[in-house]
Each structure stands twice: as structure tokens, then as C-alpha cells.
Amino acid sequence: MDDRREALLSAWMRMNVHIRGNRLLKDLSTNEVMACRFLVQNSGREVTASALCEALQLYKSQVNRLLVSLEAKGIVRRVPCAEDRRRQVLLLQEAGLLQYQQEHARVLSILSAIEGALGEQKTRTLAQLLCEAVEAVERPPSPRNRKEETHEDHHRFGQRHLPGAGEGLGHRGHPAGR
């Protein structure tokens, strides 16, 4: 057993348990906060459910449930696109923006506590390392790692559906772009 990987897994799991167990987000789920954040970051642009799927790496069915929940809470509204009435654009309602800002402030207070414990330099290093870790799992597998694919991978994707050179696996192990 690799002690470094086990230590990383243990730290990752402890953080997840803490976040979920202590219900750090009060009124919105993690996915709802991420959806609102995406809408805030893209205000002024026409955001569709498909764009939200791609940005949050969720299935269409998950995004549909998410949007139904956000609509029921009065946070988001779907309206027909001006250019193509078949498409729907997502709008963050004013009340939704306020609710998101409250949740965002809670998250920032947690991050302030982390920075207070680690200090500014270690916090910057942590942020950089987290970004590098995300990039490492987002990049296509190297030829060396590709050789380590299991029989289960071949069975699950079928020989013709395995990612080729320059392609990676998307969300939940599905070939990217499928």
C-alpha cells in the first residue's frame, strides 16, 4: 500500500466528511451553489442547461433535477432564447442572487479559517496544488497509464469506445464528448 496516496485519500475524505457532515451550506446544495456561481460568472451571457451540464460535469438528468429544485425555490427561471425559441436560457433571479451571496459568504468564511490556520503563503501553495491536482485528473491518460487500463475498462467502454490519443475520459469515466 502506498502511504502517500493513503494519506492523501484520508485527508480528502476527512475534508469531504467535514463539509457534508457539518452542512456548511445552509439553504442550497453544493450543486445548487455551483450552478448559481456559474450563472453569476456568466451574467450577461445566454446560459443553457447544456452549458451547465458541461461546466458542472453533470448528466442532463441531474441538471434537470437541479433546475427544477432551483426554480421551485425561486432562484432560477428558464426563458425562451431570443434567437431560437426552442432553446431555453437560464436566468438567476434577484432573490436567488441574494441567497447565493449568503452561501458564498459562508464558504468564504470557511476559507478564511483555513487561511488563518495555514497562513497566506501556505494558502497560496494549497490553491496552486489543488489546481494542479485538478489539471492532472482532467488531462488525458498518458500512454503508460493507458497500458494499465483494466479488463473492466475495456468491457465497460467496448474496444471501439476507448479514448484515442488526445482524448480523455469525461465525467464518471465516460469518453469525453459522448
Image: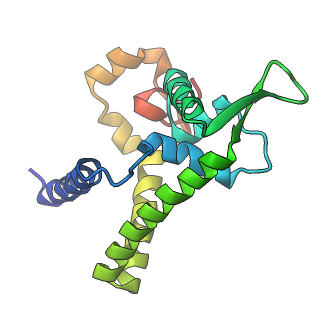
x%, y% of residue 176? 54, 31
Q: Position of residue 85 (x, y in %)?
A: 85, 21
* Farthest residue, direction left: 1
The residue at 35%/42% (across/down) is: 145
151 up-or-down from 135: above or below: above
| Relative horizontal placement of residue 5, taking residue 75 as reference (left or right) | left
Left or right of 89: which side holds 30? left
Q: Residue furthest right?
A: 83
- 103, above or below 70, in the image: below
Q: Residue 12, percent across and down? A: 25, 55
- Color encoding of the figure: rainbow
The answer to whether residue 103 is above or below residue 127 is: above
User: Where on the picture, by quarter, is residue 128?
Assistant: bottom left
Name the foreground residue: 130 vs 142.
Answer: 130
- Report whether residue 38 is seen: no
Image quarter where the C terminus lies is top right
Number of callouts: 0
Q: Residue at x 39, y 75 (%)?
A: 112
> For this rendering, which residue is in front, 93 or 49?
93
Q: Is residue 84 above or below residue 144?
A: above
In the rendered image, residue 53, in percent from the top left (x then y), is placed at 58, 33
Q: Name the residue at 29% across, 53% down.
A: 19
Task: Work out whether residue 136 or residue 116 is closer to the camera in this orientation and state it.
Answer: 116
Q: Residue at x 47, y 46 (%)?
A: 138
Query: Between 26 and 174, which is closer to the camera in this rendering?
Result: 26
Residue 128 in view in this figure? yes
